[in-house]
């Protein structure tokens, strides 16, 4: 079954001296082009995760300033796509549908952490580069707003003045607003001003797994009312009641999908695996194993219509209504 995955960190797996060919075939990663083809993917969103200097050191990589790193990552993905006959870049709904009709898998670009998007001009520059989604924050405060946090004071803080302008501009130019990692206060600010559907690209239900990165029932309902989508995150700590859990199980994924579907309706469910950004014992270890989830959902009583909404139709609607 064709599917759209809203989030992976696979670009991180390519070393400084690595080749773009590692995006095509790389057994050490959870996602590569060959396995996307094997699993009958329709589209993969590739996040450009902005590491700080300490993370670069931990990864044994030379520090690269944000804009240089973004440009390098964009060019690397585009180069890899050009070196295949079954992948193609996509920037909007028409691109994606044209690619699909030509039996090509679409690659879409995102930025995880809006810390580099410090002006409207920079957001426009990223859009011109082909970026079509920005995760507004990661785990630290930036010029847009505040992160998801165990600190209740930080959690209650919303968008900064510039953050409101950034969200409005992203709506205007056709770029998806992603609230995964955003503070609860920031979530409600986005909801109050968003004129287009927005997404939580890789988040689950907080009622089932009390990690602050997950969404409350009210948040699920709001995203649904706005016509947005919630991408199921495969990370173990976001799936279980015990947030120290290290086992990502299909059974737990189904629990979250059923819960989110029951709270927000079947039009809000989507996929956001977070492959290559998660660790632990993964029952679905990479894109090649995605059909395991779909088969399990069928056995759980999901109809073909519900499966199609989860795997592609809900995100196709969101893409059609937002991206330019």
Image (cartoon, grey):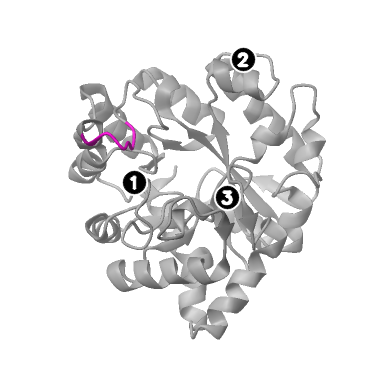
x and y percent of residue 61 in the render? 69, 19
Pointer 3 and pointer 2: residues touching (CB < 8 Å)? no
Q: Which residues are magenta?
A: 147-152
Quadrant containing the C terminus is: top left
In the image, 35 versus 87, the foreground residue is 35
Residue 11, above or below 87: above
In the image, what residue occupies the spot 52% across and 20% down?
52
Q: Which residue is mark 2?
A: 64
Q: Measuring from the top left, give residue 6's x and y in whole percent.
A: 52, 51
Q: Name the residue tied to disc 3.
A: 95
The residue carrying mark 1 is: 212
Q: Main secondary structure of the magenta part?
A: loop
Q: Left or right of 289: which side holds 120? A: left
Residue 78 appearing in the image: no
Q: Is residue 62 left or right of residue 171?
A: right
Residue 18, picture quadrant: top right
Choose mark 3 or mark 2, whichever is in front.
2
Provide the secondary structure element on which disc 2 rests: loop
Distance from disc 3 to disc 2, alpha carbons, whole Å, reads 31 Å
Residue at horizontal 65%, vertical 61%? 284
Is the residue under label 3 in contact with that under label 1 (CB below 8 Å)? no
Mark 3 closeness class: few <14, some 14–19, many ≥20 residues within 10 Å: some
């Amino acid at each position: 079954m064709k599917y759209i995955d809203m989030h992976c960190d696979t670009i991180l797996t390519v070393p400084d001296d690595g080749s773009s060919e590692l995006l095509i075939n790389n057994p050490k990663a959870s996602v590569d082009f060959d396995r996307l083809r094997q699993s009958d993917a329709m589209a993969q969103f590739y996040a450009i995760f902005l590491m700080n200097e300490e993370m670069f050191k931990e990864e044994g990589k030379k520090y690269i300033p944000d804009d240089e790193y973004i440009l390098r990552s964009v060019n690397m993905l585009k180069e890899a796509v050009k070196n295949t006959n079954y992948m193609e870049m996509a920037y909007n709904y028409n691109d994606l549908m044209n690619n699909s009709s030509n039996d090509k898998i679409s690659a879409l670009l995102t930025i995880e952490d809006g810390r580099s998007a410090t002006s409207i001009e920079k957001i426009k520059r990223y859009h011109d580069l082909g970026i079509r989604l920005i995760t507004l924050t990661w785990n630290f405060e930036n010029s847009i707003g505040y992160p998801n946090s165990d600190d209740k004071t930080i959690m209650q803080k919303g968008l900064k003045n510039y953050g409101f302008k950034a969200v409005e501009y992203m709506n205007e130019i056709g770029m998806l607003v992603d609230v995964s990692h955003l503070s609860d206060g920031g979530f409600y600010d986005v909801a109050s001003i968003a004129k287009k559907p927005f997404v939580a690209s890789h988040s689950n239900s907080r009622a089932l797994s009390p990690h602050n990165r997950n969404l409350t029932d009210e948040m699920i309902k709001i995203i649904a009312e706005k016509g947005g989508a919630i991408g199921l995150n495969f990370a173990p700590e976001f799936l279980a009641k015990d947030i120290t859990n290290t086992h990502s199980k299909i059974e737990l994924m189904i629990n979250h999908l059923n819960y989110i579907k029951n709270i927000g309706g079947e039009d809000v469910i989507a996929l956001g695996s977070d492959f290559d950004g998660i660790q632990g014992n993964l029952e679905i270890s990479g894109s090649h194993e995605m059909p395991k989830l779909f088969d399990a959902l069928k056995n759980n009583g999901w109809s073909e219509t519900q499966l199609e909404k989860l795997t592609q139709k809900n995100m196709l609607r969101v893409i059609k209504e937002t991206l330019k």
